[in-house]
Image (cartoon, grey):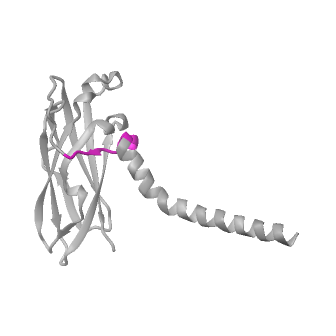
Amino acid sequence: MATSRNNLGIILAFVAIGMVGVAFASVPLYQMFCQATGFGGTTKRAVAPSTGVRDRVLTVRFNANIDKKLPWHFKPKQLQIKVRVGENAMAYYESYNYSAEPITGMAIYNVTPDKAGKYFSKIACFCFDEQRLMPHQRVDMPVLFYIDPEFADDPAMNDVQTITLSYTFYKFEQ
């Protein structure tokens, strides 16, 4: 009887440790899943520019939001551009730190409609790293991207004419 209680205690301890481990691993695992599948409008991070341009033209709209804790202005320099599927394109966002102290921010991004996220590939983006702005510093932040040529072959994308790339900047606190 004492042995079975000890075994039960050991099993419950391992289950508890396993649950804590899964809880800590869930966020990075979920991010990897979203980036691999495009789930929830998460974009891909491209390692090289696109090589195949298609005839289909899409409108890419740009949106900017900022957390109220971050004393910055943040906006797209262009509201939208037309891009051909597979074409490398560049857009800029402008940030301005209106505070009297250096502040670091981090941008989180999303693509809508969600189903297009898996085809939206970023080659270079200010959202890949934290951004530190000095007091009253204004900076243009580029994003280099393309819509994967496979987008044109996916029948589920036939109704998509416009893709919106949206960023929200948050104050980065270490």
Is residue 8 shown above or below 120? below
The residue closer to the viewer here, 116 or 11, is 11
On the image, the x and y values in percent for residue 129 come to: 23, 61
- Which of these two is toward me, 82 or 40? 40
Is 40 contained in the magenta span?
yes
Residue 152 lies in quadrant:
top left
Q: In the figure, 111 relative to 137: above or below?
A: above
Q: How many marks?
A: 0
Q: Is residue 161 visible?
A: no
Q: Is residue 24 magenta?
A: no
Q: Which residues are magenta?
A: 37-47
Task: Tell whether 57 sits left or right of 45.
Answer: left
Seen as rendered, the residue at the extreme bottom is: 101
Toward the right, the furthest residue is: 1
Where does residue 89 sit, x and y in percent of width and height? Answer: 13, 40
Residue 164 image position (x, y, % from top left): 26, 40
- In terms of image quadrants, where is residue 132? bottom left
Residue drawn at x 71%, y 69% is 10
Furthest residue to the front?
3
Image point (15%, 41%), residue name? 49
Q: Quadrant of the N terminus?
A: bottom right
Residue 99, x across and y down, in percent: 19, 74
